[in-house]
Image (cartoon, grey):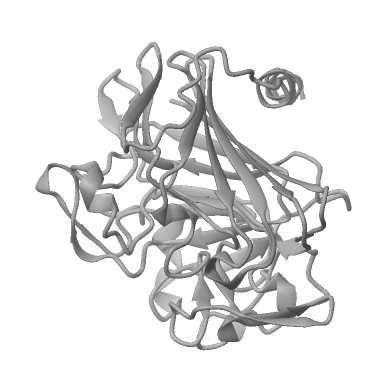
Amino acid sequence: MAKTSVLCCYLLLGLLFGYVSSSSNGGEEEVRVYELKRGDFSVKLTNWGATVLSVLLPDKNGKLDDVVLGYETVEEYKNDSTYFGAIVGRVANRIGGAQFTLNGIHYKLPANDGKNTLHGGPKGFSNVIWTVKSYKQDSHITFTYDSFDGEEGFPGNLDVSVTYMIIQTNKLAIKMEAKALNKATPVNLATHTYWNLGGHNSSNVLSHTLQLLGSKITPVDSQLIPTGQIVPVEGTPFDFLKPRAIGSKISELPSGYDMNYVLDSDGDNKHFKKVAVVQDNKSGRKMELWSNQPGVQFYTSNLLDNVRGKGGFVYSAHDAMCLETQGFPDSVNHPNFPSQIVNPGENYKHILVYRFTT
């Protein structure tokens, strides 16, 4: 209980504090690389897609490794189809049929995943240059983006910001915010980082131990669109309520995990809560994830197929895992799901924290 209280204290200090632009790079248009660093803990990012490029962490013996998958150069991210490390939106995950109706108006979106819209469309937030509003190497970086009315088919102007904060020498916090200016619009931002706690070039994550604190899922059809049901995980391969190896039941699934979990809460989905705990026994690295979102997409990088990454290492299926805290997929077409609609003047706030230990 004491550890939880201490963590919550740090969260309040680090996440709810409003940074001012004392070292602003306002108007930044050039694609650059930035680093946040404290001690041996460092994170590199770029303003292309507000993307995480690397996370460097010590293992139980003090050896440093980069624990996220990615490319060797920033240029390679511009033609990326994996969404390595990117902020995805305006609506992360899938919108069925690439369409929805809001306030009596029918909106048709560009389809980029069969007949559906994935991660905001062909040119979502992962494929644009963000402006650097504020940057301090041992503290934080804030990226901003002004999404225009009709961008990728979505209604209304939307002001978006993402702040990455390095807290002490073992916590990475991310705060995603958006404000609808003139029209109601769906908003569901997510960070699409691919984690391998053994190191990005250490092969698959099937031996990683996972505890995922979601007792229900939103099952999907053959196109990975939610059916609208919410069902318990008990007795299925999706049950990670007790820690177990990621690969222990993966053979029971067609290709691996790619599912939205309904996170357990006290009835208020805006409360900050523990989402998951991941551990790699070989390196000794452990990652806790906390968030204020109602869901998390657990994805075992099923579609990675001979993707050449950092240092020429070739990534394959299950070489990483994603834990994308989020609103439920296709919520705009399912009234029984928590609403992701942001009305004019309202604010969207998505907070998550990774805590790393060995």
Q: Percent position (x, y) of residue 96?
A: 60, 82
Point out residue 12 in the picture as x, y percentages from the top left corner.
74, 22
Residue 53 to residue 253: above or below: above
Residue pictured at 53% horizontal, 14% vertical: 168
Q: Quadrant of residue 352?
A: top right
Which quadrant holds the N terminus? top right
Identify the residue shown where x is 63% and y is 69%: 329
Quadrant of residue 288 in the image?
top right
State whether residue 203 is above or below residue 317: above
The single residue placed furthest to the right in the displayed view is: 267
Q: Which residue extends farthest left?
A: 312
Q: In the rendered view of the protein, which quadrant contains the C terminus?
A: top left
In the picture, measured across the screen, residue 271 lies left or right of residue 358, that is right
The reply to whether residue 110 is visible in this rendering is yes
Residue 270 screen position, x and y as percent: 81, 46
Residue nearest the viewer, comparing 77 with 232 = 77
136 with respect to 262 (left or right): left
Q: Nearer the viewer, residue 333 or 169?
A: 333
Give the total number of marks visible in the rendering: 0
Q: Is residue 56 visible?
A: no
Q: Is residue 4 above or below residue 270?
A: above
Residue pictured at 29% horizontal, 54% vertical: 78
Q: Is residue 85 left or right of residue 74?
A: right
Camera-nearest residue between 42 and 233? 42
Q: Residue 110 at x, y = what percent?
A: 50, 78
**What residue do we see at 56% from left, 60% from top?**
297
